[in-house]
Image: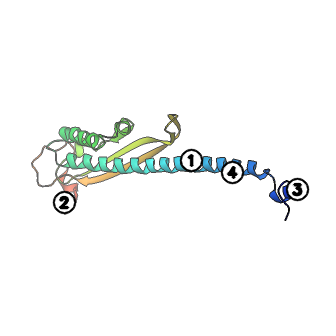
Amino acid sequence: MSAPGTPGSAARRGNERAMVAGAEALALGSIILLAGTVLVANAWAVVDARAALDAAAREYLRAYTEADDPTAAARLGTQHAAASLEGRASLWRRTHVEHPDPGLFGPCAPAAVALEAVVPAISIPLLDARFGEVTVSVRAVELVDAHQEMSTGADHDPATTPCSD
């Protein structure tokens, strides 16, 4: 073995040429990890928006089907849907509600509501940048309470409801 400082010792120690590639790999790996985290977080935001809209549709129909008349049903349904998204005001502002036909309101009549919201596909939080959009849609159907006194809609026909059998 050569003593330090002798001509053969530098060849065994090697050099630092590989360190540049190692440092670049760490930086690239960090960027890939960050980009992957942002994509997963945004995919989760779409799933979360769908779950929130589904809950809002259920709350809408719960209030709608227990109302006394078609006008109050639509108003109460909208209020309850908005209340279920209380912590997500920005989602509620981007939500379009397709209300059930008030003319068909009556005991045992099916009521269908559709909610649709546009959610950013990719959102970068620190830069407040948004790229692309994803439309999230939910649809729910429920029967109006059959055992409640109510004012029916103009087009309600008890013979066509599921309870008429």
Q: Position of residue 62 (x, y in %)?
A: 22, 50
Residue depicted at x 41% and y 42%: 117
Of the residues shown, which amino acid type is indicated by label 1? Leu
User: Picture coordinates of residue 145 (x, y %)?
Assistant: 16, 53
Q: Position of residue 29 (x, y in %)?
A: 63, 51
Residue 58: % across, % down:
28, 50
Q: What's the coloring here?
A: rainbow
Residue that numbered label 3 is attached to = 6
Quadrant (top left, top right, bottom left, bottom right) of the N terminus: bottom right
Which circle, 2 or 4, is nearer the viewer?
4
Q: CA distance from mark 2 to mark 3?
A: 100 Å
Q: CA distance from mark 1 to mark 3?
A: 47 Å
159 shown above or below 67: below
Determine whether label 4 and label 3 are within 8 Å by CB.
no
Q: Which label is found at residue 25?
A: 4
Mark 2 → mark 4, Cα distance in angstroms: 68 Å
Q: Amino acid at mark 3?
A: Thr
- Of tags 4 and 3, the one toward the viewer is 3
Q: Which mark is residue 163?
A: 2
Q: Amino acid at mark 4?
A: Ala
Q: Which of pointers 2 and 4 lies earlier in the amino acid sequence? A: 4
Mark 4 secondary-structure assignment: helix
Name the amino acid, label 2. Cys
The residue furthest front is 3
- Please report whichever mark, 1 or 2, sits nearer to the chain's N-terminal start: 1
Numbered circles on residues, count: 4
User: Is 11 rendered above or below residue 31?
Assistant: below
